[in-house]
């Protein structure tokens, strides 16, 4: 990543990261003009002096505006971009439910499903060198979603919201972490529904297609 003058919303992210796709899909869905700057996490792109000056946490995604404001954290960026749009329910209780899914995603889903995927798919670790807890807790998270999605088509209310975007990011590529999504048929159908709503390609476990 080289220092550059920014003239519009700029999203820094690595395309292999589900967290980074969340704000990108949100901006695309809402037609928010932006630039994308690819930051290679596998080659230390988030740990350079230049990037740490933008985000001392050393993580992507990061949103940055020409006036100097910068915002890390995928869900915070997504919520900010989606403010006032149909991705955030008008009803205040549904809005609280959406937030509830967003907190759950960061604490009970992403740490298992995304982390196992990273270890298996990118670090190429054999299964016996991956903490078995990641599979057990990831499957439990998919089970929670499966239960919700037997009752409703979307995680909150009757349409796509930020909750669906946040949760689909790693669920659609969970197979890369060794999870068998076909065990969760309502989740599988919901993944296709969300991918369709966002007009993003289908990450097909059977064909092994990634992002
Ligand atoms: N809670 C953060 C997690 C961000 C995160 O874990 N980013 C990873 C990529 S998915 C990263 O930048 N890793 C590079 C590093 O830690 O050096 C979010 O949702 O944005």
Image (cartoon, rainbow, N blue to C red):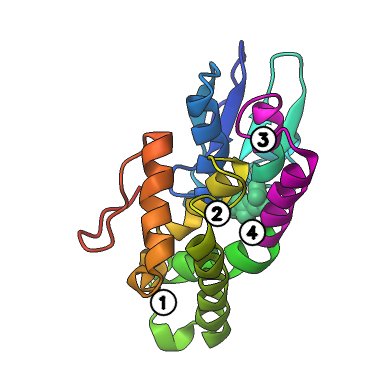
Whole-percent x and y of residue 192?
Answer: 36, 50
| Residue receiving disc 3 | 88
| Residue receiving disc 4 | 105
User: How far is mark 1 from mark 4, CA to CA?
Assistant: 24 Å
Q: Earlier in the sequence, mark 3 or mark 4?
A: 3
* Chief secondary structure of the magenta portion: helix
Disc 3 CB within 8 Å of nearest ligand 1 atom: no
Q: Earlier in the sequence, mark 2 or mark 3?
A: 3
The quarter holding residue 112 reads bottom right
Residue 198 painted magenta: no
Task: Tell me the crowding category of disc 4: few under 14, some 14 to 19, or many 20 or more residues within 10 angstroms, Cα based.
Answer: some
Disc 4 CB within 8 Å of nearest ligand 1 atom: no
Q: Can see residue 121? A: no
Q: Relative to the observer, which residue lies in front, 16 or 99?
A: 99
Q: Nearer the viewer, mark 2 or mark 3?
A: 3
Residue 102 painted magenta: yes
Please report the residue visible at 72 percent of the width from the left and 45 percent of the height from the top. Answer: 94
Whole-percent x and y of residue 110?
Answer: 59, 62
Task: Tell me the crowding category of disc 3: few under 14, some 14 to 19, or many 20 or more residues within 10 angstroms, Cα based.
Answer: many
Q: Relative to the observer, which residue lies in front, 135 or 163?
A: 163
């Amino acid at each position: 990543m080289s220092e550059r003058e920014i003239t519009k919303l700029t999203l820094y992210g690595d395309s292999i990261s589900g967290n980074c796709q969340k704000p990108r899909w949100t901006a695309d869905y809402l037609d928010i003009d932006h630039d994308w700057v690819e930051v290679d996490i596998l080659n230390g792109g988030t740990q350079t002096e230049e990037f740490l000056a933008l985000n001392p946490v050393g993580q992507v995604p990061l949103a940055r505006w020409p006036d100097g404001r910068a915002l890390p954290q995928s869900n915070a960026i997504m919520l900010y971009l989606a403010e006032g749009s149909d991705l955030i329910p008008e009803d205040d209780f549904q809005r609280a439910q959406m937030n509830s899914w967003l907190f759950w995603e960061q604490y009970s889903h992403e740490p298992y499903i995304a982390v196992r995927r990273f270890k298996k798919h990118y670090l190429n670790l054999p299964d016996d060198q991956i903490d078995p807890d990641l599979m057990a807790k990831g499957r439990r998270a998919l089970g929670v979603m499966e239960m919700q999605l037997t009752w409703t088509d979307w995680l909150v209310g009757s349409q796509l919201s930020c909750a669906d975007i946040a949760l689909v990011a790693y669920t659609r590529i969970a197979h890369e972490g060794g999870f068998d999504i076909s065990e969760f048929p309502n989740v599988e159908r919901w993944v296709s529904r969300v991918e369709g709503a966002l007009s993003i390609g289908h990450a097909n476990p059977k064909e092994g297609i990634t992002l």
